[in-house]
Image (tube, rainbow, N blue to C red):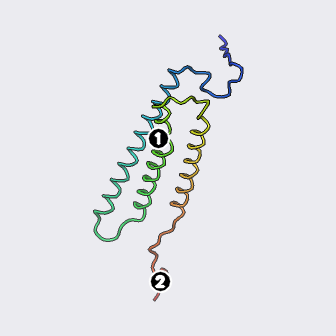
Amino acid sequence: MPVSMIVPPGCVTFACLGDKCFIQYSLTFEVIAHSITALMSLLLAIKLFFINSCKNGTKSNDIKRANRLALIESIIMAIFDIIPAAIQQKYHFQVEELGSVILFSKMCGYSLEGYLVYQTLKRRNETVGASSNGKN
């Protein structure tokens, strides 16, 4: 049974294919899913911070790096995913009016997150001693 889709003339976004109820549902789902993910990343960052700070002696650079990655994820997700979707959901903007602005915001967030993650993973251990070859 073939499925046919009628696309209205001038329809260039997904919003004009779906009805208002589905768009509201998808925005609500996006806010809830991203909020849960950001909250879990934030809880992971807090746990890693306490694990690293409760250690006696030297702090682990790997745990610091993992903590930084979890914080980057939660902050970027909150700023560039949750807030724009919540604003669009609350004020019922037409997707045709601001859809590209919200999409641009998300793409900027993904780019910034990618750059910050790259910089975090690229860092070397800063605690390399002066005589790392074992000879004095």
Q: Residues within 10 Å of mark 2 (few under 14, many from 20)?
A: few
User: How far separated are the C-alphas under marks 2 and 1?
Assistant: 49 Å
Image vertical order of residue 30 relative to residue 108, above or below? above
Q: Is 45 placed left or right of 108 in the picture? A: left
Q: Outermost residue toward the bottom?
A: 136
Looking at the rendered structure, the secondary structure element under dot 2 is loop
Say which residue appears at 62% left-offset and 23% top-offset.
Answer: 16
Q: Nearer the viewer, residue 36 or 15?
A: 15
Residue depicted at x 41% and y 39%: 35
User: Number of numbered discs present?
Assistant: 2
* Residue underneath mark 1: 83
- Quarter of the image with the N terminus is top right
Residue at 56% x, 47% y is 110
> Which residue type carries mark 2?
Ser
Residue 136 at what x, y percent from top left?
Answer: 45, 89
Q: Is residue 38 above or below residue 28?
A: below
Residue 116 % position (x, y):
53, 57
Q: Is 61 in front, or is 7?
A: 7
Q: Secondary structure at mark 1?
A: helix
The residue beneath circle 2 is 131
Mark with earlier residue (2, 1): 1
* Residue type for callout 1: Ile
Horizontal relation, residue 86 to residue 46: left or right: right
Q: Residues within 10 Å of mark 1 (few under 14, many from 20)?
A: some
